[in-house]
Image (cartoon, grey):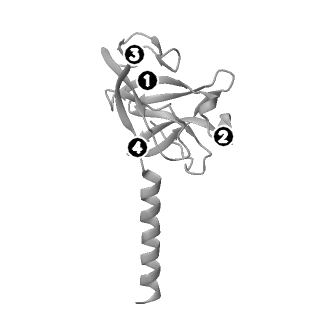
Amino acid sequence: MNIKSLTFGILSMLVITCFIGCVTNNETETDEILKTFVVTESESKWIIDDGALQMDFPDDAIEDELTIVIKTVQGGDESDAYIPNTLYSFEPDGTKFKRLVKLSIQYNQDDLPPGINESDLKIGKLIEGSWHPINGTVDTDNNIVSTFIWSFTRFGMICANSGILVMMKLFI
């Protein structure tokens, strides 16, 4: 066996091991529906679960009307990036908006892992087991992170400087 084959074999095993470890996702959707509501073409604001979630739909963000279902997702992720108890499923999954919709998620400071700086929090989009951070704002006085979204999927709170995420500009 030559050195190139051995090096390739070792690197392949490391990449596979890292990939499996980084993408582990233990999310399990609960049967609990937090809220079901209908949004029309008119501007509307929805405060859900005593302020844990807030959605602001501008005029003409959707065609006609849309029935939205929001569910909690337990477990989330084993990565250091995910902030516990902040993962939600927004349905119908894949729904696209004509205009940006503001999404705000509230967090509990007691759920933040040690050493996490609140200013590093972001809302993340969970795609095939990987977190994708979305630029937004952090209101540390009220423990709320906000961003703008183009579509529905699963969103949760993440720490962008956890060492697991690679910062990228993601257009959603």
Q: Dot 3, how many residues are within 10 Å of its Cα: few (below 14), some (14-19), or many (20+)? A: some
Q: Which residue is rendered at x = 43% and y = 13% of the image?
A: 59
Q: Extreme bottom residue here?
A: 1
Q: Are marks 4 and 1 in contact (CB under 8 Å)?
A: no
Q: Are marks 1 and 3 in contact (CB under 8 Å)?
A: yes
**Residue kind at label 1, given as amino acid type:** Arg
Q: Element at badge 3?
A: loop
For residue 95, above or below residue 63: below
Residue that badge 1 annotates: 99
Mark 4–mark 2 Cα distance, whole angstroms, equals: 22 Å
- Report the mark closest to the observer, 4 or 1: 4
Residue that badge 3 annotates: 60
Residue that badge 4 annotates: 26
Mark 3–mark 2 Cα distance, whole angstroms, equals: 38 Å
- Report the mark closest to the observer, 1 or 2: 2
Residue that badge 2 annotates: 116
Mark 1–mark 3 Cα distance, whole angstroms, equals: 7 Å
Q: Quadrant of residue 65?
A: top left
Residue 172 on image: x %, y %: 44, 36
Q: Which residue is rendered at x = 42% and y = 34% of the image?
A: 74
Q: Dot 4, how many residues are within 10 Å of its Cα: few (below 14), some (14-19), or many (20+)? A: few
Q: Dot 2, how many residues are within 10 Å of its Cα: few (below 14), some (14-19), or many (20+)? A: some
Q: Element at badge 4?
A: loop
- Report the mark closest to the observer, 4 or 3: 4
The earlier-in-sequence mark between 4 and 2 is 4
Q: Element at badge 2?
A: loop
- Report the mark closest to the observer, 3 or 2: 2
Q: Which residue is rendered at x = 36% and y = 37% of the image?
A: 28
Residue 156 on image: x %, y %: 49, 33
Asked if residue 63 shows in the view, the reply is no
In this rendering, position of residue 17 left or right of residue 140: left
The earlier-in-sequence mark between 4 and 3 is 4
